[in-house]
Image (cartoon, rainbow, N blue to C red):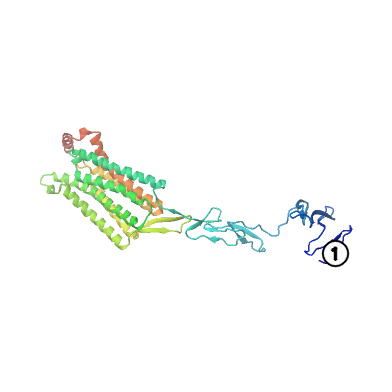
Amino acid sequence: MKVRFKTSGGEELYFDENGDITSLANIINWQLTPEGSMKSVTVGWFKHYAEDGKQLFINNSAIMWNGGLLQVPKSVCSEACHPGYRKVVRQGQTLCCFHCIPCSDGEISNTSGMFNCIKCTEDYWSNADKTLCTGKYVEFLSYEDPLGTSLAVTSVVSSLVPVIVLCIFIKHHNTPVVKANNREISYFLLVTLTFCLLTALIFIGPPNNDTCVFRQTAFGIFFSICVSSVLAKTITVVIAFNATKPGSQLKHLVGSKTSFCTIFCCFVFQFIICIIWLSISPPFSDTDKTLPEKILIQCNEGSIFMFYCMLGYLGILATVSLIIAFLARNLPDGFNEARFITFSMIVFISVWLSFLPAYISTKGKYMVAVEVFAILSSSIGLLLCIFMPKCYIILIKPNMNTKQYIVRQQTSLFQQ
């Protein structure tokens, strides 16, 4: 406040009661010339008496910094790390020297210059820039998913085929092709195949404890009935052929009663397996939040041993049917189903043998899709191999669907 002096030009300088200079003050920059001498350059001024906002003026382009730099020198070794990065100090250097390392997946940094990234909670995941935690998306095989939609449409459309075949069989129920090898079991098998194909729909949609229990037990029970029906038809072929021999005691076993008893006995074992499974450790809905970017909702099979017991029993039924059908494939019968059952069981077993490694190696909605695909393909394989040849004769070759044709065919076979 008490400072008061005159410049070399005779101008008096002093400070007022607020500490502000009362006259014009030039801002001088001392610059080094190429010759090595120093010169003063006016790079701005300060006018206390000017209006607000125009009191200070600095020409930044005229300033020369130490070392001949025209830009403001940096006071740090490294630039501040942007959000999404963290600082890692360079070994052997000062703290202001560091590397900027991107945050790991699942971690973020939302401000500049952070030394540590923040880990997202289990329901969230880092965005692409690693600056924000966003909610994980929930994954399961849904009807909105293109994969789920295609499988659902395939299931519904395919289930109409056995219904159409059943209508054809009922319309021609008194013809030889339909009556051959127990038509009641054929009707029953077609109805069961319809339910097997529709079972695939239970696997699509958000899993919960009820659907997880129902989907596997329904699959195991319907398919055991289906394969048991095929086995019953195979046994019927063998019994029917041997019952025609003179003095045979098997005539009283020919008919639907024996076939349905076979189906019931085979079904009971699968039913017991499912009851034990549900009593010990039933399937339940499980949520996996450990995966990056998504929360996986799927059915936990509970007792995996019982799950494979169920599949194993289906494999045993299919194998027995295949063996019996293969041995009976050349029996002299005009409409011998054994060869078609042999093909159907080969398809069935091949599908499920391929299913196991694919099922084990996948996870989430693709694991469910693998099982749905196996259900659809094996059901369609049974339907095509067993019933399409009969539909071909009924609709395309009606001359073969007569009693006279069967007599001529059987006479020809016996003569051979």
Asked whether the viewer can see residue 259, the reply is yes
Q: Residues within 10 Å of mark 1 (few under 14, many from 20)?
A: few
Q: In which quarter of the image is residue 179?
A: top left
Residue at mark 1: 4
Q: Would you place residue 309 above or below residue 176 in this image?
A: below
Q: Is 131 on the left or on the right of 205, as rendered?
A: right
Q: What amino acid type should be assigned to the residue bearing mark 1?
A: Arg
Q: Where is residue 86 in the image (x, y as percent from the top left)?
A: 59, 59
What is the count of numbered marks? 1
Q: Is 290 on the left or on the right of 10, as rendered?
A: left
**Residue at image location 46% in from the left, 57% down from the top:** 291
| Residue lying farthest to the left in this orientation | 247
Q: Label 1, secondary structure: give it.
A: strand
Q: Where is residue 14 in the image (x, y as percent from the top left)?
A: 83, 62
| Residue lying farthest to the bottom in this orientation | 2
Q: Quadrant of the C terminus?
A: top left
Q: Quadrant of residue 102?
A: bottom right
